[in-house]
Amino acid sequence: MMLTHGPVSAAAAFALGVLAISMPSAMAQNGLVGEYFDIPNLTGLVTTRVDPTVDFTTWGLSPDGTAVSPDGSYSERWTGFVFIDRSGQWSFTTESDDGVRLRVNDILIIDNWNNHAATTDVGQISLSPGWHPIQLEHYQVGGPVVIQLSFAGPGDPTTIIPTERLSVSATGNTPPIVDAGDDAVIQPDVTQYSVMGTASDLDGIIVDIDWDQVAGPPVSILGANQLSATMIGFSTIGVHRFRLTVTDDDGAQAFDDMTVTVTSTGSKGGVITGVNRVWQTLTIEFPSAVYIEGANPNPFLDRRLDVTFTHVASGQTLVVPGYFAADGDAANSGADTGSTWRVHFTAPRAGDWSYQASFLAGDGIVVDDSVVGTGLDFHDDQATISILPYDPAAPGFLGKGRLDYVDEHYLVHGQTQRPFFKVGTNSPENFLAYADFDQTPASHTYGPHVGDWQAGDPTWGGGLGKGIIGALNYLGSKGVNAVYFLTFNEEGDGDDVWVWTGEEQRMRFDCSKLDQWEIVFSHMDRLGIVLHVVTQEEENGDGPPGLDFGNLGDERKLYYRELIARFSHHLGLIWNLGEETGNSTSQLTSFHDYFRANDPYGHPVVVHTRPGVMEVIYDPLLAQDKLQGASLQVQDINNTYDRTLQWRSQSAAQGTPWVVSMDEHGPPNEGAVPDNNDPGHDELRRYGLWANMMAGGAGCEWYFGFSFPNNDLTCEDWRTRENLWDISRHAKEFFEQLSSPFHMDPADDLISNVNGRCFAWPGRDYAIFLAIGGTTTLDLEGSGRKYRVRWYDPRLGGELQVGSVETIQGPGVQDLGLPPYASFEDWAVRVELMPPTRIRERTNPNSSPGGTTPGGGGGG
């Protein structure tokens, strides 16, 4: 719901929580009172004014257009009231560079008070209708700037809080509340549709009502000046958007929109289910003649579904492959027969998207582009779908966006643009050899994790799947954000995972099994866990029983296409061309090119290989720009830093920055042993996990070896390595605090500790890791600015801590002192431009603002 302009009564003063500011009556108006300070710690007041919104991406903040502070370092505080139009859970979103704090109803709901690049933060609070006090604080320490304040009510998209919903006083006119009703989908033979809006005013009455059409093919409106109206004359496929505007007796207005979508007619019309928001999946199911998995015509080979989605406003086009889905409920029914075809669509932007289906018949048409097909059933079906903005409160990747490769050394979330640091499990590689999947050897039950399944979590077949869903819940709760698994391992170590109707089959897929996989993968999206899809194992990569003797032939094309059609809509997905691959350069090039040409969402493609042949595999692929990353296996964990740095540096020099992960480590028989055998995992932590990230790598996955229970093929209980998940999460959280890893590079020459590593954005941000403790110096080179020194415990995580030296100032070489305790252990050090100190909260409304508490607040 959005509100338009309207006057608000003046008031002489306002109070917010513990802070009171006396304002002249002229400032009692819409907007927030902004105080601008020339120092980042909210002291040194330069000016005060009323800002209509907080939506700044370029700066010249003082009323006369001059900068607040000549060195680009300053702070601001906005105070006032926000109007809430209905009860429920509200989300408040800030986009900030650098620090930000937000209080609503005097409750701190966002606290990211440290130096960082542009970052999205979301806080939630339950609110009742009416005006509520709000306070936003921000500071900037040089460099780019952004500070924006948005909100979203229950079921609403996130929008910048408009002027009419902000006030310097809680005693002004309350805007009216309006709801245009639910969106609707109709067929074009339904020529009219009645709508029922609602409106109220908390401090007066509604004096004017007006329905207007604001988008779409025109229709007539009967009763446009009543809450109940009828739209007449629908005939054209498309989205019709209507706006209900109401005005109260003080002249304040509010409006809300609803849509009526006219979809295609007849038996071939697609049925749309799912959530029509950015980053959330819509599924369209089309009815056809009856097909059978094992009969001819082969529905996987001789029938081809592609749906072209076009963003109406921008013209962006995505061609999304579809697939045969048996009866449409195969996960539960086990069906191998049916008349349902399905396509999954995950929109990357809001607005109207049109689609057109192509459903063609022809012998081998799915793998042979030369075949001219014949249109059948729902061929040429078309409609338009209205996609709402993303929901920042949605779980997992749904609230952050798809993981994209953006020519950087890190994948980024498509919505927040924040880097992704991977801490995952590499074992068991036969993760999908699960007893509750149809036609699957029962290598795993994940019995110890059945108790981690929660009410409301998905199951199939009358309650199956609780073990694997519970296991993922546990991993997600520990901060694990990636799972490595094979989708084909015939004659490999496990010999228990395949996508087809039988182990020897290559051209017909198991609809019920793959639908059950889809349930699991969708749960991973909601948990924020990446699908690291490894498409083959060493033993079947380049010869029988593999696909096309290792080439890109009909078997492999069909296999890849089915994976893409069924699973590419997932937001966290990495395609891995093979485990310990032995395929040739030309073969791997053709595999890579097929994924890049046919995956509409452009997920990154990597390949995993043995330590001794890395150069043989990676060098020619890098030279041809044929991968987006390297999935490293290191025999000796002590080589992790050098190997990560090697491929990061070579790819950067080639102009194709790779995302470099350490995904398997030796020795092969041990790997990451259970906590009982190695409680601290010291070597893995120091020379694997932190080594990869300090070299500019994207993270690690842990391989369990073969020597202990719960190993690479037999793992049933991930709690056997709970300590390992904890220390991995600690590393991830440290790197997530960095201002901008995209600007940072390995820079060991800046420190004096020979056992240390340095990852630096010179002059702005430094991360230092001391593998065996001690101390070090840091060369600030020509920077004469002041920096904060904080220590981080890689073993226990938690807050940044103060050591023997709290601050340093350049230029030149400076001593960082000692950690707060256990100086002989490994420590990380964060050295950043001096952030502001925390404001001492005032409990006396008559006291003056401006006091500070030394040493607090910056994210540590």
Image (cartoon, helix red, strand yellow):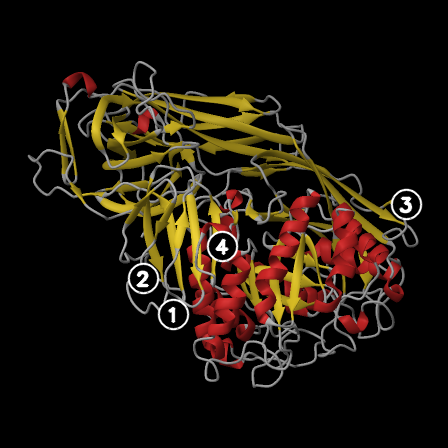
Q: Is residue 241 left or right of residue 780?
A: right
Q: Residues under labels 4 and 3: Cα distance?
A: 40 Å
Q: Residues under labels 3 and 2: Cα distance?
A: 70 Å
Looking at this view, name the residue that lies furthest to the top. 64
Q: Which mark is residue 825?
A: 1
Mark 2 residue crowding within 10 angstroms, few (<14) / some (14–19) / many (20+): many
Give how far across and how far down residue 820 sits, in percent: 28, 63
Q: Residue at x 34, y 61 (%)?
A: 798
Amino acid type, label 1: Glu
**Residue under label 2:** 819
The foreground one among 842 and 622 is: 622
Give how far across and how far down residue 691 sits, in percent: 53, 62
The foreground one among 678 and 54 is: 678
**Residue under label 3:** 373
- Which of marks 2 and 4 precedes in the sequence? 4
**Residue under label 4:** 396
